[in-house]
Image: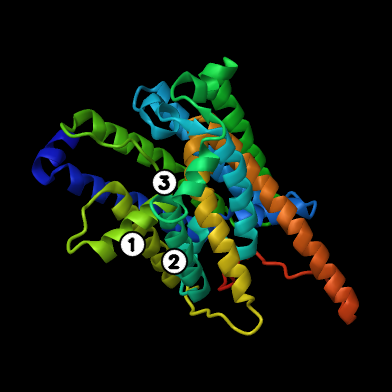
Amino acid sequence: MLEFILDRFGDAETLFALGLAVGLLFGAAAQHSRFCLRAATVELGRGHVGPRLGIWLIVFASALLLTQGAVLMGWFDPAQSRQIAGVGSMSGAIIGGLMFGAGMILARGCASRLLVLSGTGNMRALITGLVLTIVAQASYRGVLAPARETLFGLWTVPGGAARDLMAITGISRPAVLGAAAAMLLAGIAAALRGGLERSRLLAAALVGAAVAAAWTGTHAIAQLSFDPVAVSSVTFTGPATDTLMGLINERTLTLSFSVGLVPGVFVGSAAMALARREFRLQRFDAGSGMERYLIGAVLMGFGAMLAGGCAVGAGVSGGAVLALTAWVAVGCMWLGALATGWMMDVRGSRAAARDGIAGGPDTPSIPLRPGPTSLT
């Protein structure tokens, strides 16, 4: 069937369609589940294991379980992924991960969450995401590239077994699947204790399924294509820069998986928001702290390119193939976010005490029932 599709429509068109389909699923499911690494770190940093952390655990565990299950079934070979086969950087994962974690707290959302929120009418997220994308491009090929390359080269790891956690630790694949299943159950329990609707739990699992579907789909196309095809999954900084630069620099946009992914996520999120009457325009105002958003965008743009991916690209997609640098990067994203969140909480509490205002710092909410409230 896939061979017929490739012969009929071509490799680029098929990859674009796959990216679009994965993006639609990811966007709609991420919007409904309110999947957000930043929200999970804020919740944990305030000493609470609840629905936000539960959603993140469900997404991560689902992606890991389904991806490794596909490997066990022979549908996917992680050794062909960039996260395993290419040269990695421990220094990049550490420094970039810390920068990205701090940035997503300041910007009130990671790269994927900003794109999802943009589809719901959030102009703050749209502008912040555009700045993030421009900085990411400058870090990849522009004026910031020399700094990124210097930091990347401080501590590199060769591709292959040196980046494969299974080869490093000797853990078996059934053990990985068992750990992923346990993590999934823990996430479900935390989310249910927080009073989340079951449809949001299912949506979170579908976010993880989108990651696994991208891995298996691009791998299947790569196996049948006569031209080199990158085996990849859901990530946002690279695809966003590819799409933006293609629209700016080229008269016609070259189709690819990443070019289909970005508009797919936007449309999927917008469709879900419209269907659930959650779409509404949100702008910067006097109390928004626009400079905080922009500083966060700069940190995330540079940090993602240095770390080898964003909170989804490195943290979920890279984590699902058990890439060493991806696990280090997402761990440092957590550390950077927890530290930055703590500092902002302390600052907010001191300001409230100084002004004689009851309560603490600005706290985003995750709706336990349907409604228009967003995480930003």
Q: Secondary structure at mark 3?
A: loop
**Picture layout, residue 31 above or below residue 217:** below
Q: CA distance from mark 3 to mark 2?
A: 18 Å
SS label for mark 1: helix
- Residue in the image at 67% along x and 44% along y: 189
- Does residue 55 appear in this view? yes
| For residue 293, side relative to residue 82 (left or right) | right
Residue 234 is tagged as: 3
Mark sitting earlier along the chain (3/2) = 2
Q: In the rendered structure, which amino acid carries the disc numbered 2?
A: Leu
Tell whether label 2 touches label 1 (CB within 8 Å): yes
Q: Horizontal and vertical percent for residue 158?
A: 47, 24
Q: Residue at x 76, y 52 (%)?
A: 45
Q: Please state the horizontal and vertical placement of residue 302, each as a whole percent of the image.
A: 52, 53
- Of discs 3 and 2, which sits in the foreground? 2
Precedes in sequence: disc 1 or disc 3: 3
Q: What whole-number distance in Å separates the C-alpha atoms at marks 1 and 2?
A: 9 Å
Q: Is residue 361 left or right of residue 139?
A: right
Q: Residues within 10 Å of mark 2 (few under 14, many from 20)?
A: some
Q: Residue at x 47, y 45 (%)?
A: 313
Q: Report the front residue among 356 and 190.
A: 356
Label 1 vs 2, first from the N-terminus: 2
Disc 2: which residue: 130
Amino acid type assigned to the residue bearing label 1 in the image: Leu
- Marks 1 & 3, CB-CB < 8 Å contact: no
Q: Residue at x 61, y 40 (%)?
A: 94
Label 2 secondary element? helix
Tell me, yes or no, if residue 312 can be seen here.
no
